[in-house]
Image: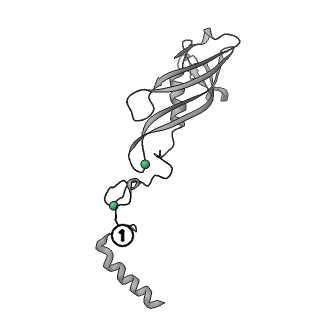
Amino acid sequence: MRLIVSDIPEEGLYNETDLQITVGEDAEKENAHVSINVHKFGKRVLIKGNAGMSSLFMCSRCLKQFYLPLSADFEEEYLPAPEVSGAVEQELTAEELDSGFYSGDEINVEELIREQMLLAVPMKPLCKPDCRGICPKCGKDLNDGSCGCKEDGIDSRLMPLKKIKESFKYRKE
Ligand SMILES: [Zn+2]
Ligand SMILES: [Zn+2]
């Protein structure tokens, strides 16, 4: 979806639409439901809205793929891209640093939505908040039940040593 800046009416516009974007690990594009309010102040464009979608991610504990719901409310300001004048680099004002830029009278709304969805992705996606992960020893998915490996994570070859330590502890008491 491309927004043509000169086509934005004075009173602004509202648009509710579905966009196909890629966010997660799935190469397929996924459907994002988007609603935006667009206002223009001179050459400045303000886009307010929200977006929601489900995207395929790998659980950081059990490594299974799952659909993670993502949603975001956003408010983005766009300015026309500064003209590059010769070798002199223009210094950006604080206002410009906070804004997005558009060039050629167009704003790429897909790109905006994709950025917002990426920002909504947690550092470590989990298939469910209490995912038990996989056993580091046998690799079994512990969400399907425990595997019978020792939970203290001590290698069984070290067990005799542990017993000796425990007997020391006993003697002290
Ligand atoms: Zn998981
Ligand atoms: Zn195990």
> Which residue is drawn at the image coordinates 46% and 26% (left, top)?
21
> Which residue is drawn at the image coordinates 48% and 47% (left, top)?
128
> Which residue is drawn at the image coordinates 45% and 45% (left, top)?
127
Q: Pick the residue in front: 104 or 168.
A: 168
Could you say where residue 9 lies in the image, as x and y percent from the top left? 66, 10
Q: Is residue 164 above or below residue 78?
A: below
Mark 1: secondary structure: loop
**Which residue in the rendered view is the most extreme toward the front?**
145
Could you say where residue 26 lies in the image, as x and y percent from the top left? 39, 33
Decide: few, some or many residues near mark 1? Use Cα within 10 Å; few <14, some 14-19, many ≥20.
Answer: few
Colour pattern: one colour
Instruction: Report whether 119 appears left or right of 12.
Output: left
Q: Which residue is mark 1?
A: 154
Q: Is residue 45 above or below residue 141?
A: above
Instruction: Report whether 77 appears left or right of 84.
Output: right
Could you say where residue 152 lies in the image, as x and y percent from the top left? 40, 68
Numbered-mark total: 1
**Which residue in the rendered view is the most extreme toward the left?**
157
Could you say where residue 169 lies in the image, as x and y percent from the top left? 44, 85
> Which residue is drawn at the image coordinates 44% and 88% (left, top)?
170
Q: Pick the residue in front: 52 or 4.
A: 52
Image quadrant assignment for residue 168 = bottom left
Label 1 CB less than 8 angstroms from ligand 2: no
Q: Look at label 1 and name its amino acid.
A: Ile
Q: Is residue 23 above or below residue 169?
A: above
